[in-house]
Each structure stands twice: as C-alpha cells, then as structure tokens.
Image (tube, grey):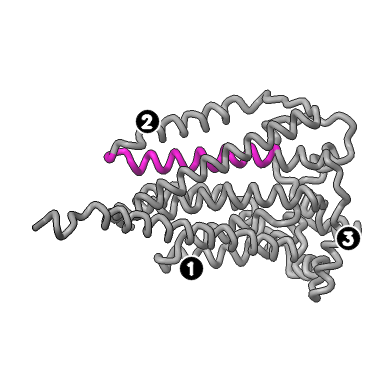
Amino acid sequence: MESKALSPAADRTADRFRELSFWLLLASAVIAAALAAALRIRVDPTGSTLVECLVAGLLLASRIWWRRTEHQRMADACGTVGVVALSGMACGAIAMLELRLHFPLADAMLYSADRAIGIDGIAIVDWLLRLGHWVFWVMAPAYNLTIPIFFVGLIILAWIGERVEAWRAAFCFVGTLLTTCLIAMFTPAKGLGLWAPATLLERLPEQAMRTFWHHFDDFYFGAQPVLRMQVVDGVISFPSFHAIVGFLVLAMWPPRPLPCAAAAAWLAIMLVATLPGGGHYFVDLLAGFFVWAAWFALSRWIEQRAAAAHSASAVSALPSPSASS
C-alpha cells in the first residue's frame, strides 16, 4: 500500500477529528471521575500503572512529533492509539460505575424486542452448537480480537499516510463508546444468557454468553464494589459495542477492495459470534449499527465543513481584481 500526499483540506479535516477526539476523551474522563466521586466508589489503580504509563508515553510522543513533517505518521499512530486506549479506560469505568445507579434491568424488554421482530437468539445459539464446536474455534478469535483488530487498523492507516481515515476512526470510536455508555446507563442488561437453559450453557465454551456477569453483579448488586482499573471491562449488552467496532473497522477500508472484503468477511463472523460469545440480543446489534451510523454521518458532515472552511479561507486569501490592477 502506497501513501499519498494529503491536500491542505484533508490535513485540516484530520486535525479537526484529532481536536474533537481529545474533547470527547476529556468529557469521558470527567464523567467517570464525577460518577466515582458522586457514588463514593473506591478506585484501586493497582496493576494498571504500566498501561497508564504506556498510554501517556504514546500521547506525549504524538505531541512531540505532531509538527514534525518527517514524523507525522508516527505522531498519528501514537496519537490515535493513545486516545482510543485512554477513552476505553475512561468509558470502561463509566460502564461499571453507572450500574450503581440501579436503573431497572432491561433484559425482559430486549428479549421481547427480539421476539417481536422474529429473532430467537437462544435457538440460533442452539443451531450453532449443532454444527459442531469447530464453529466456535472460528468465531472465538473473530469476537475476542475485535479491539486488537481495530488498533492494528489504526496503526496501518496512520503508517500509510491515511490521516483523515485514521483520525476519523479514532473520533468515531471515542464518540460511539461514550454514547454507548450513556445509553446503557438507562438500559442495564445481563444479556441473552439470562434466558438460556442450563443444558444449553453446559454445551457452550466456558463463560460463553456470560463473560461479564461477575463484574456486572459486583457493581449492580454488590454492597461495596471497588473499581479496579486493571480489570475494567465491558459490562454493556445494549447497544453492542463489539458490533460498533466491527462497523468502524469495515468503514476504514472502502477505497481499498482487498482489505474491505477481508473486513466484511470478518465482520459477518464476528456479528454471529456476539450471540454465543457476548450473550447479545439481536436488537443490541441493531442499536450498535445505528449508533455507528450516526457518528459516521457526523464525521462526514465535519469533513464537509472543514473542506468548505478551507475553500473559503483560500478564496479570501486571493488578491482582489482591483488590488492586482
């Protein structure tokens, strides 16, 4: 893959996405800190120091290299990965802390919504099991490696000079993740596994459909939970953030047929895997798609505004006819 020289308008768009990503990251961190303080939850940072130092190093490297043309790709790679990683930590904390608000569980509503549109998730998982466990050997990596695949995509885009797409992906990641957390605040759910018979759960790989139940129970039902940063993870069923990241990965590559085809094939497998792997309802995936679509459309609008602003500034910089005469 060859890099291409970006126009000033494209550079302006990438810088705008970068700026907005940092503002969204700041908002996520403030919300997480406010929730922890308001709910009086003890935060235990033990074990996360190495990760925090690594993320801080990435952001510092990005800042140092930002205005150095010869290091622009490295600055973008460090910056996008650092912003996404830090937002994941902040929003992961939000996802766990908001369970302490004890909004009513939404599982009955989500399960009914699935049935209303003719989807029986339990029957689908049972059908997958009947195909044989080789199916899970294929689906498990597709599901478990969703975030690493996104990180790799960010690094590749930055390294080949696709600044706009790299920072668009980072911007949409931070925005969709914060949106997902805010929606999930009012719709806490344990997922499809809640309705699965014990005989079905026994046939599944260990913890399938109920991977986050332990942390969900700690914060939703526990008396004095402790937020341990080294175990911050996803406790969100609706909307599905796995689905959102899958669409983000697919949207990275439209101009490049080969990566786009590979991303589409992976996305199809990963979406199916969200039912037995994450215990998601089908409406979780639909909600994830709409959250992604809204933010992606917003990114396109921002891109158009940035291009228009650049064109306007370029026109205003031209000498007037009277001045040239």
Asked whether the residues under the numbered discs 3 and 2 touch, taking CB atoms below 8 Å apart as contact, a structural biologist would say no
- SS class of the residue under badge 2? helix
- For the residues labelled 3 and 1, the Cα–Cα distance comes to 37 Å
Q: Residue at x 75, y 51 (%)?
A: 184
**Hey, which quadrant is residue 135 in on the image?**
bottom right
Asked whether the residues under the numbered discs 3 and 1 touch, taking CB atoms below 8 Å apart as contact, a structural biologist would say no
Q: Is residue 78 magenta?
A: yes
Q: Residue furthest bottom?
A: 118
Q: Residue at x 64, y 34 (%)?
A: 30
Q: Amino acid at mark 1?
A: Ala
From which residue to which does the magenta span run?
Answer: 69-93
Disc 2: which residue: 64
Disc 3: which residue: 108
- SS class of the residue under badge 1? helix
Name the main secondary structure of what is drawn in magenta. helix
Disc 1: which residue: 261
Q: Amino acid at mark 3?
A: Ala
Q: Residue at x 40, y 65 (%)?
A: 256
Q: Residue furthest front?
A: 322
